[in-house]
Amino acid sequence: MPPRRRSILLSQLSISAPGGPQPTILDELRRVILAGDAPSNTPIPIDEVAELFGVSRIPVRESLKTLIGEGLVDHRPNLGYRVAQLTAAELREMYIVREVLETAALPIAVEQATDADRAHLIEINRQLEASLTEDDSREYHRLSREFHLSLTRPSRMHRLLHMLESAWNITEPVQPMVHVAGSDRASLHDDHADMIAAFLDRDSDALLRAAQHHHTRLNSVISTLSNDHGLFADPPAETPG
């Protein structure tokens, strides 16, 4: 039997001191997954993680249970823990969820945005432009999330915002914007320009129209992602009727 390959997740963990508390373990595992440093379906060997953190299996297992509840980790009998892997249909579904939640927040965000909120949005948009110029797909992906959340945070609708961030988190292991064509990222960024202009003009109707156009394009782009590199899980087998 060939030796088992070491999980890439282990090399991405940052551990300041052994024996840290369970919340520290949870935060670090979540950080690595959300950053895309451990792709979907990456094994999470509980014994080796525990050894790295200098703890027993118990706090690691408790952390993984929390991450399962957040949709970031899967546990399968005889296969152990793995970074969650969506099917293509599930990814498209989560983008619809994100669109619905964002659309609900935008009109109120426009009304309540402060000068600081608008300045932050302008700065994120500037950084997005730079990531396109440098063809840095990972940075574009990270900043695209921040752009959209910066549009909605001024709503101060904390429960809705929590649901929106949770929906974003579920799609993060896929890192969709890393896998789409550069021309698609550029087109999506053009949409961002229309959205930010409406936001700064405090025109909620124009913002909603621009957001709808953007999400239509975004859903189309997401539908082009292939499974050539094992990006998606296989759809569940249909049970005979």
Image: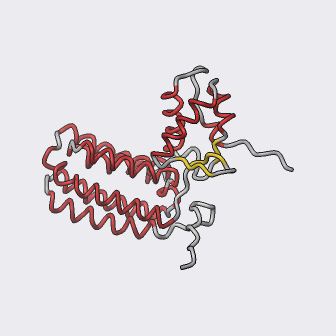
| Quadrant in which residue 45 is drawn | top right
Q: Where residue 2 appears, x then y in whole percent?
A: 84, 49
| Quadrant in which residue 112 is drawn | top left
Q: Where residue 32 appears, x then y in whole percent?
A: 54, 40
Nearer to me, 202 or 51: 51
Q: With respect to residue 38, does 51 lie above or below?
A: above
Q: Where residue 65 appears, x then y in whole percent?
A: 52, 40
Nearer to me, 121 or 233: 233
Nearer to me, 154 or 59: 59
- Left of 133 or right of it: where is 239? right
Residue depicted at x 24% and y 53%: 196
Judged from this view, the residue extending furthest toward the bottom is 241
- Left of 42 or right of it: where is 62? left
Is residue 21 among what the camera can see? yes
Residue depicted at x 50% and y 38%: 31
Q: Where residue 15 appears, x then y in whole percent?
A: 58, 26
- Left of 105 or right of it: where is 140? right
